[in-house]
Amino acid sequence: MPLAPAPNDAFPRDAASIDLKAPVPLRPEGGVSGA
């Protein structure tokens, strides 16, 4: 959730969060698992 307080920490955190959550919610197999 804390992605606005620190832009330096938000960049790497956002990329890592999307990289791990993108393939999950995008797939119908684990869409709810990532959410």
Image (tube, rainbow, N blue to C red):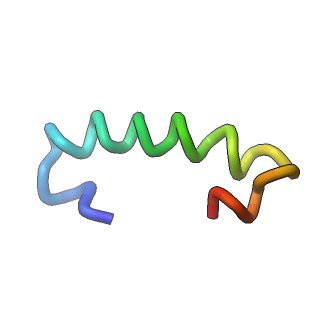
Identify which residue is drawn at 70% across, 61% down. 33
- Which quadrant is the C terminus positioned in? bottom right
Q: Is residue 34 above or below residue 21?
A: below
* Image quadrant where residue 27 sits: top right
Residue 15: percent from left, percent from top? 40, 35
User: In the current view of this chain or complex, which residue is farthest to the right?
Assistant: 28
Residue 14: percent from left, percent from top? 37, 43
Q: Is residue 11 above or below residue 6?
A: above
Left or right: 11 as drawn, with respect to 8: right
Left or right: 28 as drawn, with respect to 35: right
Q: How many marks?
A: 0
Identify which residue is drawn at 41% across, 36% down. 16
* Image quadrant where residue 20 sits: top right
Identify which residue is drawn at 45% across, 44% down. 17
Identify which residue is drawn at 62% across, 42% down. 22
* Image quadrant where residue 1 sits: bottom left
Left or right: 10 as drawn, with respect to 28: left
Residue 28: percent from left, percent from top? 86, 51
